[in-house]
């Protein structure tokens, strides 16, 4: 029986934020530069409001400037594009994040494409996706970046490992697969049309689940000794009528089979905002022509 270790993403993210805060302070002391992150929220979606509030609070905590732009739900695409252009031109703003989803009257792809790729701290612009794909310096989407930091910390070199990513979205599955490939893994991307998914998953030394289906990946799908990264965040009903969060992996079943696993909550989730701050720092340095620390 394998001893399964739960990866503490919350503690790792707190440590990363401390390191970012030190580097932000150094940047100010040595160069007089204070990184600035602009977050744009259109409408009043409750989950998005919570994300934006958390992002702004953590931005300030690490010593960066936070610029919040809250626009009404009936904002036109033209008005949002005008704001993005203003933020692109503002030297105090080093990173721009437009919170998704956007209301139906706005074409998200057009808005993401309008963000200056050098300030695209979500890493969703096609220029950054393309740079990642060809192995150039890119701003990498935050959740995939966080997954890679955890993997490298716990496993060291990933070279030669079999990695299976379940999910092929542009914001999670595809960029994680690119990063694993860059780290010299042999990568398989599985999705809703994959045949014999349990067999495909059982090949994985590193199994990443980014599907959005509660506890779909069962214990029997996991290769003994594998590392499991559970990106899924699913809200399911509890017996008392309230709800609880579960991942895409049956966490209890993975005990004694996986060597490492990220829990939900407390695994990948906390890394996402910390990596947004990391990307803002990276973007600031690149814009100022400062080599990366
Ligand atoms: P999407 O819905 O965009 O993509 C889901 C992917 O899963 C698709 O590629 C889909 O395949 C695949 N899929 C769906 N059903 C199956 C199935 N039965 N078997 C195999 N593959 C399947 O989701 P996201 O990538 O945006 O998010 C995935 C999960 O990660 C969600 O739970 C989300 O909440 C969570 N998330 C967590 C974050 C964090 O901070 N921890 C950040 C972002 C997301 P196909 O392409 O064929 O349809």
Image (cartoon, rainbow, N blue to C red):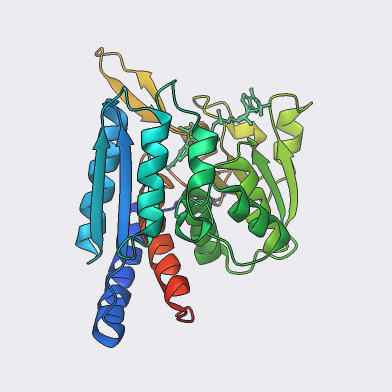
Comparing 123 with 196, the one in front is 123
Q: Position of residue 150 (x, y in %)?
A: 49, 58
**Residue 201 in view, yes or no:** yes
Q: Position of residue 155 (x, y in %)?
A: 57, 64
Q: Judge from the rendering whether residue 188 lies leftward or rightward of residue 118; answer left or right.
A: right
Residue 52 vs 117, above or below: the answer is: above
Residue 238 vs 114, above or below: the answer is: above
Comparing 48 with 200, the one in front is 48
Q: Quadrant of ligand 1?
A: top right
How many marks the image carries: the answer is 0
Q: Quadrant of residue 61?
A: bottom left
Residue at 37%, 60% (x, y): give it: 12
Residue 23 vs 254, above or below: the answer is: below
Q: In the displayed orientation, state which residue is furthest to the bottom.
A: 30
**Residue 266 in view, yes or no:** no
Comparing 225 with 131, the one in front is 131
Q: Position of residue 95 (x, y in %)?
A: 38, 57
Comparing 230 with 275, the one in front is 275
Q: Position of residue 216 (x, y in %)?
A: 57, 26
Quadrant of the snapshot with the C terminus: bottom left
Residue at 38%, 37% (x, y): give it: 80
Q: Judge from the rendering whether residue 237 lies leftward or rightward of residue 191; answer left or right.
A: left
Q: Judge from the rendering whether residue 2 lies leftward or rightward of residue 33; answer left or right.
A: right
Q: Quadrant of residue 138?
A: bottom right
Q: In the displayed orientation, state which residue is furthest to the right.
A: 195
């Amino acid at each position: 029986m394998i001893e399964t270790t739960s990866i503490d993403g919350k503690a790792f993210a707190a440590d990363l934020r401390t390191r970012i805060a030190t580097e932000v302070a150094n940047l100010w002391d040595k160069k007089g530069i204070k990184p600035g992150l602009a977050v744009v929220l259109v409408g009043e979606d409750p989950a998005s409001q919570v994300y934006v509030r958390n992002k702004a609070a953590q931005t300030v905590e690490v010593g960066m400037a936070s610029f919040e732009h809250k626009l009404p739900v009936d904002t036109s695409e033209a008005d949002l594009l005008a704001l993005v252009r203003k933020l692109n031109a503002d030297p105090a703003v080093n990173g721009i994040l437009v919170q998704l989803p956007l209301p139906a009257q706005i074409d998200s792809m057009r808005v993401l494409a309008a963000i200056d790729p050098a300030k695209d701290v979500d890493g969703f612009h096609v220029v950054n996706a393309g740079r990642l794909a060809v192995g150039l310096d890119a701003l990498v989407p935050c959740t995939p970046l966080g997954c890679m930091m955890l993997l490298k910390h716990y496993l060291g070199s990933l070279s030669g490992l079999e990695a299976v990513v379940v999910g092929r979205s542009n914001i999670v599955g595809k960029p994680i697969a690119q990063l694993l490939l860059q780290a010299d893994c042999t990568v398989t991307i599985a999705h809703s049309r994959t045949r014999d998914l349990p067999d495909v998953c059982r090949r994985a030394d590193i199994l990443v689940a980014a599907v959005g289906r509660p506890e779909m990946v069962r214990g029997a799908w996991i290769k003994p000794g594998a590392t499991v990264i559970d990106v899924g965040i699913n809200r399911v009903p509890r017996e008392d009528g309230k709800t609880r969060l579960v991942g895409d992996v049956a966490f209890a079943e993975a005990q004694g089979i996986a060597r490492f696993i990220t829990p939900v909550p407390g695994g990948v989730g906390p890394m996402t905002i910390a990596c947004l701050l990391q990307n803002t720092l990276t973007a600031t340095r690149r814009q100022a022509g400062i080599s990366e620390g």
